Image: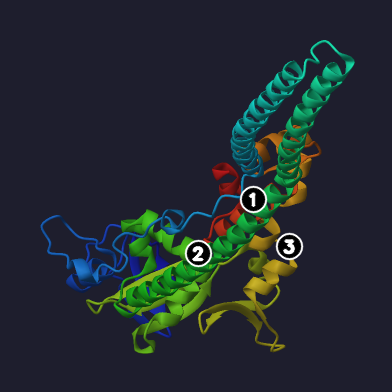
């Protein structure tokens, strides 16, 4: 039974024994508490010597700042433009090369025509039908040779034009394959970092508990780091309190009990005094406690159980069944985005993000450039899930997006 209030404590009475608590919101830190906070979190005055190698959590970073960014989706429009530019350069080179051949054929033709005229003059046939026919045949031969060269040139150009779309599609396929590989590597790296940070966060919570530092005191001293711990662990106040409770050495626990809508843990502090750690019991569980269930922590897991019936239920399962678990708050889905934004807005967002597809046309003429909405939404869905894994709510993610 608690006599007094946390702001004005008098004593705790547990099993007939009275304990005077030493912890209040304004209580000074003990040397032992200072040591653990300095070692684990780098918290201390400017004059204190904080070992740099021991500050595992001296700076708990925003997860997003330590993750490799997702690769950019291949820019299909840019690939088509690059391939067209490359093809045009090749066409220009072909035309320049064949221009020389055409000029040579024209020079040879003129020389041949000159010889025919000279032969007609020498034979005294100038002005005759025979001379005119011979001159015409020489001109036709020149035109035919030039025409054959032009046809060869046009055939090579047509071959290039016919393959431009195929080459562009092949490049797109190769770059998409590379994109998917890089995207998978980014996802794996992201998950590995989240797992490591979660493990380190668990270790720091355990260090607090084993060193006699309560979550209440830590939250008062460093509210932002307290919230970051929850975010890295992906838990709420109740789960964090349960993790802390399960990490406290058994010989330091004086009593654990439910007091109204709070769960209270009395422990012996580093100075030998009694400290009180309390955390709220979830609202959904409070309804069960009024029906004979009691709140308890077993192996770091919050549960409720009924002493009369022996029934026990995990708090998280109760929250999920009641539709109030964190997952039920995940409203950011592709359907949500489709219903919230018009198709024109989604298409513009896709284009702005580099998700573009081209439809129809030939060699850049008549093609329509459109935003690839489905690819864009798939990418956004991956990004949203990574933020969720990092402990952010959908409301927070929506603000970031």
Whichever of callouts 1 and 2 sits on the residue coming sooner in the sequence is 2
- The nearer-to-camera label among 3 and 2 is 2
269 w.r.t. 373: above or below: below
SS under mark 2: helix
| 60 left or right of 50 in image | right
Label disc, if present, on residue 190 of the rendered structure: 2
Which residue is pictured at 30% across the width and 67% down the height? 23
Q: What distance separates the C-alpha of mark 3 from that of mark 2?
A: 29 Å
Can you tell which mark lies on residue 380?
A: 1
> Image height check: is 297 above or below 393?
below
* Location of residue 150 in the rendering, given as x and y in whole percent from the top left corner: 73, 33
Q: Residue furthest front?
A: 123
Disc 3 target residue: 323
Which residue lies most toward the left here?
A: 47
Write down the quadrant of residue 278 in the picture. Answer: bottom left
Is residue 371 something that shows in the picture? Answer: no
- Residue 209 is situated, as x and y percent measured from the top left of the image, at 36, 76
Comparing 57 with 366, the one in front is: 366
Q: Is residue 358 above or below residue 108?
A: below
Q: Earlier in the sequence, mark 3 or mark 2?
A: 2
Count neighbours of disc 1 (C-alpha within 10 A) and say few if under 14, some if 14 to 19, many if 20 or more: some
Could you tell me residue 62's position as x and y percent? 42, 55
């Amino acid at each position: 039974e608690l006599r007094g209030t946390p702001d004005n404590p008098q004593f705790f009475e547990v099993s007939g024994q009275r304990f005077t608590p030493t912890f209040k919101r304004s209580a000074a830190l003990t040397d032992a508490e200072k040591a653990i906070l300095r070692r684990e979190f780098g918290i201390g005055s400017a004059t204190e010597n904080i070992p740099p190698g021991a500050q595992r959590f001296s700076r708990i970073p925003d997860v997003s700042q330590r993750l490799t960014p997702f690769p950019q989706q291949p820019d299909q429009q840019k690939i088509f433009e690059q391939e067209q530019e490359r093809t045009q350069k090749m066409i220009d080179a072909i035309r320049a090369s064949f221009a020389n051949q055409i000029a040579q054929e024209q020079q040879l033709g003129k020389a041949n025509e000159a010889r025919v005229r000279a032969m007609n003059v020498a034979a005294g046939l100038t002005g005759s039908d025979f001379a005119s026919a011979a001159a015409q045949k020489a001109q036709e031969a020149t035109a035919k040779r030039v025409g054959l060269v032009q046809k060869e040139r046009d055939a090579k150009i047509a071959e290039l034009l016919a393959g431009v779309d195929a080459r562009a599609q092949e490049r797109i396929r190769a770059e998409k394959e590379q994109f998917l590989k890089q995207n998978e590597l980014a996802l794996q790296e992201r998950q590995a970092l989240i797992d490591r940070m979660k493990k380190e966060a668990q270790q720091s919570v355990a260090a607090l508990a084993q060193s006699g530092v309560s979550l209440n005191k830590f939250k008062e001293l460093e509210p932002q780091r307290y919230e970051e711990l929850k975010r890295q662990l992906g838990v709420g106040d109740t789960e964090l309190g349960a993790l802390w409770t399960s990490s406290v050495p058994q010989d330091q626990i004086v009593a654990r009990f439910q007091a109204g809508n709070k769960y209270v843990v009395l422990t012996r502090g580093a100075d030998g005094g009694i400290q009180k750690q309390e955390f709220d019991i979830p609202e959904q569980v409070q309804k069960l406690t009024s029906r004979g269930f009691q709140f308890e922590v077993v192996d770091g897991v919050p549960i409720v159980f009924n002493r009369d019936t022996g029934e026990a239920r995990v708090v998280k399962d109760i929250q999920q069944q009641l539709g109030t678990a964190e997952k039920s708050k995940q409203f950011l889905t592709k359907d949500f985005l489709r219903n919230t934004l018009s198709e024109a807005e989604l298409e513009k967002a896709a284009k702005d993000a580099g998700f573009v597809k081209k439809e129809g046309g030939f060699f850049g003429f008549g093609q329509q450039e459109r935003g690839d909405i489905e690819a864009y939404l798939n990418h956004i869905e991956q990004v949203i899930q990574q933020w969720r894994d990092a402990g952010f709510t959908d409301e927070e993610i929506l603000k970031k997006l």
